[in-house]
Every structure is written in C-alpha cells, then in structure tokens.
C-alpha cells in the first residue's frame, strides 16, 4: 500500500466516522430543524433568524453547509429574549 493510498484510506475513515456521529446526533430524538424551517414556524424572516444565530447567541449546529437548531436551545433563547410580534 502506497503512502498516498494510506492517506486516502485514513481520510475515508474520518469521513465515515464523522458521518456516523452526525447520524447519531440527528437521530437522538431531539427535535432539530433547519433555520429556515424555524423562521417559518415562528413567523419571522430568515434574516432575523440568522442574526439571532450570528449576533445574539442562538446555538446552532452545522452539518456540512446545513445549519440546524435544537428545539430546546431555541426555547431557551426565546425565554431569554423579548421578540416583537410578527407583522400581520
């Protein structure tokens, strides 16, 4: 086995392990939705929701290029922050 082949095999093992950890986390029974889905459910814009993550401390998990927020983290965040009612 060449050095390059060993390196590729190790990279593959790391990707598989990372995928398995992600799979286990996503199947843990906690309600976890993408940011846009939570924004729709709460009646706020996606920009507002992303600013909560970027500037106000809402915890989020990245899986590749996808961002997920746990329901319990969102509930904790909402309990600590005052949110204006959406425009009707």
Image (cartoon, rainbow, N blue to C red):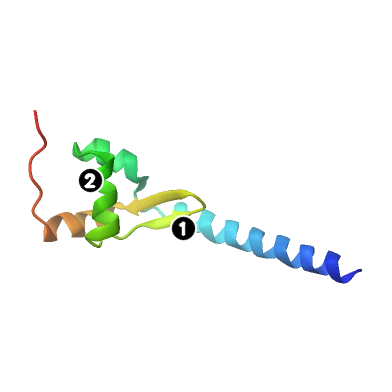
Q: Is residue 62 left or right of residue 33?
A: right
Q: Is residue 32 above or below residue 54?
A: above
- Residue sitting farthest toward the bottom: 3
- Nearer to us in this view, 40 or 27: 40
- Res. 55 image quadrant: bottom left
- Res. 81 image quadrant: bottom left
Q: Is residue 7 left or right of residue 50?
A: right
- Nearer to us in this view, 73 or 59: 59
Measuring from the top left, give residue 70's x and y in whole percent.
Answer: 32, 54
Q: Quadrant of the N terminus?
A: bottom right
> Residue 48 bears which disc, if any?
2
- Which residue is pictured at 44% across the width and 56% down the height? 62
Asked if the residue under mark 2 is in contact with the one under mark 1, i.e. CB atoms within 8 Å, the reply is no
Measuring from the top left, give residue 41's x and y in whole percent.
Answer: 24, 37
> Mark 1 or 2 closer to N-term?
1
Numbered-mark total: 2
Q: Quadrant of the C terminus?
A: top left
Q: Residues within 10 Å of mark 2 (few under 14, many from 20)?
A: few
Of tags 1 and 2, which is closer to the observer? 2
> Residue 5 bears which disc, if any?
none
Regarding residue 72, the answer to whether it shows in the image is no
- Which residue is pictured at 66% across the width and 59% down the height? 16
At mark 2, the secondary structure is helix
Circle 1 is placed at which residue position?
25
- Which residue is pictured at 27% across the width and 43% down the height? 47
Instruction: Give the Cα separation between the discs numbered 1 and 2.
Output: 26 Å
Measuring from the top left, give residue 7's x and y in whole percent.
Answer: 78, 68
């Amino acid at each position: 086995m060449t050095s390059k082949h060993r390196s590729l095999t190790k990279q593959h093992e790391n990707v598989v392990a990372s995928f398995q950890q992600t799979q286990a986390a996503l199947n843990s029974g906690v309600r976890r939705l993408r940011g846009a889905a939570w924004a729709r459910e709460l009646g706020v814009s996606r920009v507002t929701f992303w600013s909560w993550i970027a500037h106000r401390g809402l915890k989020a998990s990245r899986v590749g290029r996808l961002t997920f927020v746990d329901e319990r983290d969102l509930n904790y965040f909402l309990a600590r922050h005052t949110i204006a009612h959406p425009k009707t």
